[in-house]
Image: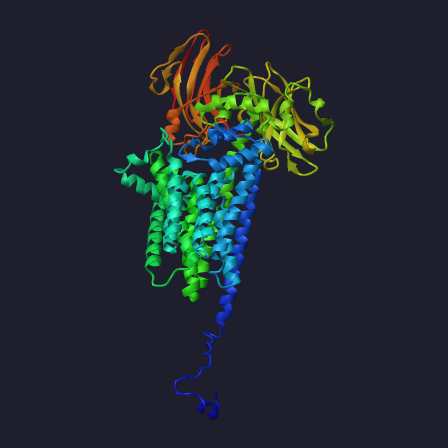
């Protein structure tokens, strides 16, 4: 338009086009290109973090795929296909109506012999669907591939974080992912696209899935009505949503009763402060998990502050979006209602669980809805930056990356926590396979007061060949091992051994033993997972499962195994590892089952680790109140107390041993019996810790002179000593017990 003749042809009202302004380089640098490169780097790092988190969590779920029922799952087992047609399908479980999770349990029973495999498949599939749903919601709101890759990485990293290990590593927890999928599906159906009747139908189905998966889904129909009103659905459509919500809530509350050990939501109007504190800590649950992972002090306080900030951020976003003159996009509206679901979940949880205390709000299982809450808030902010403040896109991506890095760094800690719980279930599973009703082992899969239910359900599973008894090897007890497998002779394929054999008390009084050792496949260079224990004649007397720490640190990681067996008298016991899918076995060690034989790491090495402990009584007298020697008759002294390798971290003893050491250094060991000590569990606030209490009757026959009494506990093939000691002055007819300072 530089030609004056062309300029004269234009009317005066038409402005002349301006040449584009070229941004001058600053400090000689091409900042737009550098910004684009930095965004590509941020997107790539987010993708790498997500790949690591997803990969490691998938490995965790695969390692968790055990055919062993756990905790509440013992009461939800299916023994007949007719149960799915009974009132059980709709019956109340705690505060929940588990209709859709029970349908998944039925498929697992029908197709997989109730071995949890289908449950774990769903535990991976459902988060994938939630991730896909969130990305579909956001896809049109993002302007380029860099934003989409970065968002995809952030979504996958948060929704697959092993912070949720309680839900990922337990098939029964599939409802936590179902309720989220239903909520996101309902909000997406109403918030995206046209206000059509098909969207209303999809939303009603999705909120039904959500509500009848977990109690937290009860808020979804109400939020859906508010969302439909905001999106200007017709009065008839909103009326249908209202009728659906009333029907869903009415059926849910029909016959509902508040569990006796939970809070009654209708009796808490005067407890505003405890409920508000619980809501704040619940919202801040992910921050508490990270604080614990990195060893920060006061995780509950951190969670409470973070939760309060999150609630304020949600309130600010809700006010800004509802009062903005601009119509918010459908993706933003869906994200806001998703965050509202997270906030309502915290409120509903607080109304039912506030009496359990604030530490309960920091449980791993509660991080699942709260990660979705924080993700929704973060994505609301990021989409606002993309649409209205593009110059802040790179800083926003950098801030998000700074949040993803510690999440990925804590992944190893969360997986370690999960594996420790998985190993407890394996040990209990070995006891169930061997028919050993040992309280310590069974309490790892159900509270001690419910062990009779576990034993009854175990017998039913065994008769019907379900769960851990679906595998043919569970039927080998009492038969020669050679009838079922080909036994390899000579060294070469396997390395291993038996590290410890000790007797354990059983509920039925039958002789029960536990054994531990290690086994390694030298051909495939992998730890061996299934161990069969045989007697001197080669008959199968018990089972073991692998994946534990080995008895000696020099052996390969995770090559340890633990097992249980039954034998009436002291005799040689051999351990065989199964290979080639159970068709071949190779012997990894032989030892003698005998009483009063401690593990070698107790008897043959110096024990430097100090445990939490208390020697409470000796011969019925309080040990701490002894001021003069106690005369003991009948060549026996009874001792009682408690031990725990790390009580404040919830680590109880695998076993407790008492030793008497003579002046010449000769030692005699006595295995202690385990007893319940609820007072110790309550004091340390560790209700799931192994029973720390012990009692022992020390046979003094043949002992004379001065004997030093010491107490040891074991955990993960390590020994811990109690700093409390006692000195016994023994004569021919009696013993005098005196105190010895710590």
Q: Position of residue 74 (x, y in %)?
A: 49, 28
* The residue positioned farthest toward the bottom in the image shown: 5
Q: From this viewpoint, is residue 340 visible?
A: no
Reply above or below: 653 against 203: above
Q: Residue at x 60, y 14 (%)?
A: 569
Of residue 676 and residue 601, the one placed in the foreground of this image is: 676
Residue 547, position in %: x, y?
A: 58, 34
385 up-or-down from 685: above or below? below
In this rendered view, identify the residue nearer to me: 206 or 583. Answer: 206
Tell me, yes or no, if residue 217 can be seen here: yes
Residue 265, image x, y percentages: 32, 36
Residue sitting nearer the eye, 227 or 510:
227
**Quarter-wise, where is residue 14 in the image?**
bottom left
What colour scheme does the image use?
rainbow
Where the C terminus falls, by quadrant?
A: top left
The single residue placed furthest to the front in the displayed view is 236
Kindly identify the residue that appears in the image at 52 percent across and 56 percent down.
Answer: 45
Task: From the top left corner, tell me how far across and down residue 10 is, in percent.
Answer: 44, 88
- Indicate whether 549 appears above or below 450: below
Q: In the figure, residue 647 lies in which quadrant?
A: top left
Q: How many marks?
A: 0
Say left or right for 384 vs 265. Answer: right
**Is 311 in front, or is 248?**
248
- Measured along the vertical axis of the image, is residue 24 above or below residue 313? below
């Amino acid at each position: 338009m530089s030609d004056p003749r062309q300029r004269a042809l234009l009317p005066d009202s038409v402005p002349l086009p301006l040449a584009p302004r070229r941004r001058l380089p600053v400090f000689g640098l091409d900042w737009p290109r550098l910004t684009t490169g930095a965004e590509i780097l941020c997107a790539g790092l987010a993708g790498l973090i997500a790949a690591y988190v997803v990969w490691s969590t998938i490995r965790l779920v695969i390692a968790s795929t055990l055919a062993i029922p756990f905790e509440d799952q013992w009461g939800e087992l299916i023994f007949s296909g007719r149960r799915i047609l009974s009132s059980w399908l709709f019956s109340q479980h705690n505060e929940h109506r588990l209709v859709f999770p029970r349908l998944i349990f039925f498929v697992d029973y029908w197709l997989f012999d109730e071995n949890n495999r289908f449950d774990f498949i769903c535990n991976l599939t459902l988060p994938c669907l939630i991730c896909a749903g969130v990305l579909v919601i956001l896809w049109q709101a993002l302007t380029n591939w860099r934003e989409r890759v970065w968002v995809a990485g952030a979504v996958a990293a948060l929704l697959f974080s092993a912070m949720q290990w309680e839900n990922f590593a337990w098939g029964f927890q599939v409802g936590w992912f179902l309720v989220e999928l239903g909520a996101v599906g309902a909000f997406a159906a109403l918030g995206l696209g046209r206000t059509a009747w098909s969207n209303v139908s999809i939303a009603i189905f999705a909120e039904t899935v959500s509500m009848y998966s977990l109690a937290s889904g009860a808020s979804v129909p109400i939020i859906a009505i508010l969302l439909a009103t905001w999106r200007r659905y017709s009065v008839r459509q909103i009326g249908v949503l209202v009728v659906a919500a009333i029907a869903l809530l009415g059926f849910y509350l029909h016959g509902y009763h508040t569990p006796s050990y939970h809070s009654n939501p209708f009796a808490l109007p005067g407890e505003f402060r405890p409920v508000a504190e619980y809501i704040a800590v619940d919202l801040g649950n992910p921050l508490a998990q990270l604080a614990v992972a990195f060893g920060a002090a006061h995780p509950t306080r951190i969670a409470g502050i973070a939760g309060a900030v999150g609630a304020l951020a949600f309130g600010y976003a809700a006010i800004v979006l509802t009062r903005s003159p601009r119509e918010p996009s459908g993706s933003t509206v869906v994200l806001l209602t998703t965050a509202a679901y997270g906030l309502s979940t915290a409120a509903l949880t607080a109304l039912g669980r506030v009496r359990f205390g604030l530490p309960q709000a920091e449980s791993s299982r509660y991080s699942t809805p709260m990660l979705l809450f924080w993700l929704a808030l973060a994505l609301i902010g990021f989409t606002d930056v993309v649409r209205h403040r593009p110059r802040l896109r790179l800083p926003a991506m950098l801030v998000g990356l700074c949040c993803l890095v510690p999440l990925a760094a804590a992944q190893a800690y969360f997986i370690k926590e999960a594996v420790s719980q998985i190993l407890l279930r394996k040990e209990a599973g070995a006891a169930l396979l061997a028919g050993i009703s040992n309280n310590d082992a069974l309490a790892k899969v159900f509270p001690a007061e419910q062990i009779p239910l576990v034993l009854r359900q175990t017998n039913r599973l065994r008769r019907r060949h379900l769960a851990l008894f679906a595998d043919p090897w569970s039927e080998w007890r009492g038969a020669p091992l050679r009838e079922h497998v080909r036994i390899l002779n000579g060294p070469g394929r396997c390395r291993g051994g038996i590290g410890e054999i000790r007797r354990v008390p059983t509920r039925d009084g039958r002789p029960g033993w536990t054994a531990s050792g290690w086994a390694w496949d030298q051909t495939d260079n992998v730890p061996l997972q299934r161990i069969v224990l045989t007697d001197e004649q080669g008959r199968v007397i018990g089972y073991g499962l692998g994946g534990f720490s080995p008895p000696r640190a020099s052996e390969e990681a995770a090559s340890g195994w633990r097992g249980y067996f039954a034998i009436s008298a002291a005799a040689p016991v051999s351990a065989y590892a199964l290979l080639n899918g159970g068709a071949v076995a190779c012997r990894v060690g032989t030892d003698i089952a005998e009483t009063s034989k401690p593990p070698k790491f107790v008897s043959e090495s110096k024990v430097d680790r100090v445990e939490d402990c208390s020697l409470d009584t000796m011969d019925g007298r309080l040990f701490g109140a002894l001021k003069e020697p106690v005369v003991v008759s009948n060549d026996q002294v009874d001792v009682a107390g408690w031990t725990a390798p790390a009580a404040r971290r919830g680590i109880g003893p695998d076993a407790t041993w008492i030793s008497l050491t003579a002046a010449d250094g000769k030692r005699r060991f006595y295995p202690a019996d385990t007893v319940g000590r609820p007072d110790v569990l309550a004091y340390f606030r560790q209700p799931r810790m192994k029973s720390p209490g012990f009692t022992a009757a020390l046979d003094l026959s043949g002992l004379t002179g001065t004997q030093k009494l010491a107490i040891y506990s074991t955990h993960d093939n390590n020994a811990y000593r109690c700093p409390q000691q006692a000195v016994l002055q023994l004569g021919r007819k009696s013993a005098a017990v005196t105190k010895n300072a710590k």
